[in-house]
Image (cartoon, rainbow, N blue to C red):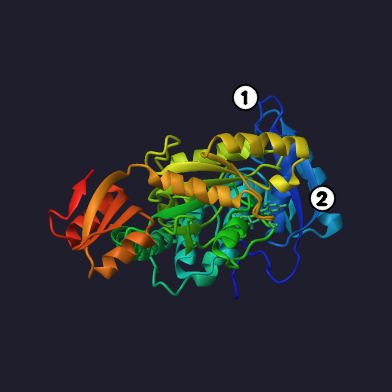
Amino acid sequence: MSYDSPFDIPTAHHTKAILVHVYAKRPKEPLKRTIEASIEEALGLAEAIDLDVRYHQAIPIQRINPATLIGSGNVEHLSQIVNSEDVKLAVFDTTLSPIQQRNLETGLKCKVIDRTGLILEIFGRRARTAEGRLQVDLALLKHLRSRLVRAWTHLERQRGGFGFTGGPGESQIELDRRMIDAKIMKLERDLDQVKRTRSLHRKKRIRSDVPMVALVGYTNAGKSTLFNRLTQSDVFAKDLLFATLDPTIRPIKLPNGRTVLLSDTVGFISNLPTQLVAAFRATLEEVCEASVILHVSDTAHDDHEAQKADVFNVLDQLEVDYDVEFQKPALIDVYNKIDLLPTENKNIIVNRSNLCNKFVAVSAHSGEGVDSLLFAIQEALQDNVTSYQLNLPAKDGALLAWCYRRGVVSKREESDIGIILTLALNPAQYAYISQSVAHDALAKL
Ligand SMILES: Nc1nc2c(ncn2[C@@H]2O[C@H](COP(=O)(O)OP(=O)(O)OP(=O)(O)O)[C@@H](O)[C@H]2O)c(=O)[nH]1
Ligand SMILES: [Mg+2]
């Protein structure tokens, strides 16, 4: 699939790049991550678009320089490296103002992108479905609109096709802004359509009473690997940040025979641009409406705790109303990659997991703990159930099969007129059955 980088980063070759991480020399709050870990992650992001990072540096900042962020001495030093290594791109692992970006490009004599730009570039290359493309394009345009200080070559190339000639005397920026606004409006309309279709699908699923279980977590936590193990499928999973972008949904069977739908989706990261969170709302709505959220984390990662905090931060931005007390949706903490832990640490986590089913230790890699996870999901879904007795005429095989498929049958007796079932039903299941049988056939126990 060809991809036209909005930041003009060549996609065919390993572009030579430098990476600059900046941090406050005297931070107001203690840092959540070490500087090394932050650089490691930024290098991972650069790798995700095949950059050939020739040099990286962490620069302490005492005072933000409004013109260049890092000050002229640092710019001079970096420009020498850019020159000697024939570097084409400088990635700043922070947010740059449009002015800083432009001045840095002039000073370094190469293209400059910041963290948001880098993440948008990755997402742009990963998006495969029409919906993914729409969401990325929308986030990208909003990003570009917020930094209209110069003519964007990307827009330059596309200009002309939209018929925005503008009146005489209008500035180029105003023209760009109008063009972008028109495109944003169109994309928002298209996305609305996608949302409507998604919501229809969702309503259908709710009607058919197949609960949704959503995987969420930091990028590279192992969501897709776990998804593949649970669904016996083969979606793309790799040691790569943002390997997954487009959501996938597949059915799985719980130990009691009940079928649920499992969804895999885009991972989160610290400082996820708000435009991206907003743009991916349609995709992430699956998460908002899931009956159970599986929060997958990489237990073996040094930044495990900081990553968890970042995920909950994004869930809050999405206004997902999860609940560890198993109201709706239930949240299960899945501690993944336990195979990588030293035995002692692993034992502590596994023991804790044995005590509480809101917390499950697994290895998506080896399969250890996956059975317990299935039981934990089952348990979370049992929440909110009431016992009923159903007198079912023997001829109603379809409803009988429905009850077994959903694993709600706890007792079965045969009588002269049919079958008497004891059922554990949640309100949606109760509503479904009560519609399908005579009103005195279903009674609360
Ligand atoms: N050792 C070990 N590696 C794992 C485990 N689960 C996943 N991995 C590895 O971790 C890397 C990331 O896995 P993915 O499943 O792609 O992670 P993800 O959460 O889907 O990541 P994104 O789609 O990028 O958000 C891959 O190299 C997996 O093989 C595990 O339990 N143990
Ligand atoms: Mg994935």
Query: Residue 235, relative to residue 410: is it above or below?
Result: below
Residue 233 appears in view: yes
Residue at position x 82%, y 44% from top? 77
Q: Nearer the viewer, residue 39 or 9?
A: 39
Residue at 45% of width from left, 53% of height from top?
Answer: 213
Please tell me which residue is depicted at 71% across the width and 37% down the height of the picture. Answer: 347
- Please name the residue that numbered disc 1 is placed on: 29
Q: Nearer the viewer, residue 192 or 435?
A: 435
Of residues 61 and 139, the one drawn nearer to the viewer in this rendering: 139
Q: Position of residue 280 (x, y in %)?
A: 46, 55
Numbered badge on residue 331 = none
Ligand 1 closer than 8 Å to label 1 CB: no
For label 2, the crowd category at 10 Å Cα-Cα, with few meaning under 14, some 14 to 19 and many 20 or more, is some
How many numbered tags mark residues here?
2
Residue 429 occupies quadrant? bottom left
* Residue at image point 69% right, 24% down: 26
> Does 125 sit left or right of 14 as displayed?
left
Query: Which secondary structure lies at badge 2?
Result: strand
Residue 192 seen: no
Rendered location of residue 370, percent (x, y): 59, 52
Q: Is residue 60 above or below residue 13?
A: above
Q: Residues within 10 Å of mark 1 (few under 14, many from 20)?
A: few
In the rendered image, the vertical position of residue 407 relative to residue 41, given as above or below = below
Where's ligand 2: which quadrant?
bottom right
The span from disc 2 to disc 1 (Cα, nearest Å) is: 28 Å
Point out the image quarter for the C terminus. Answer: top left
- Closer to the eye: label 2 or 1: 1
Residue 55, which numbered label? 2
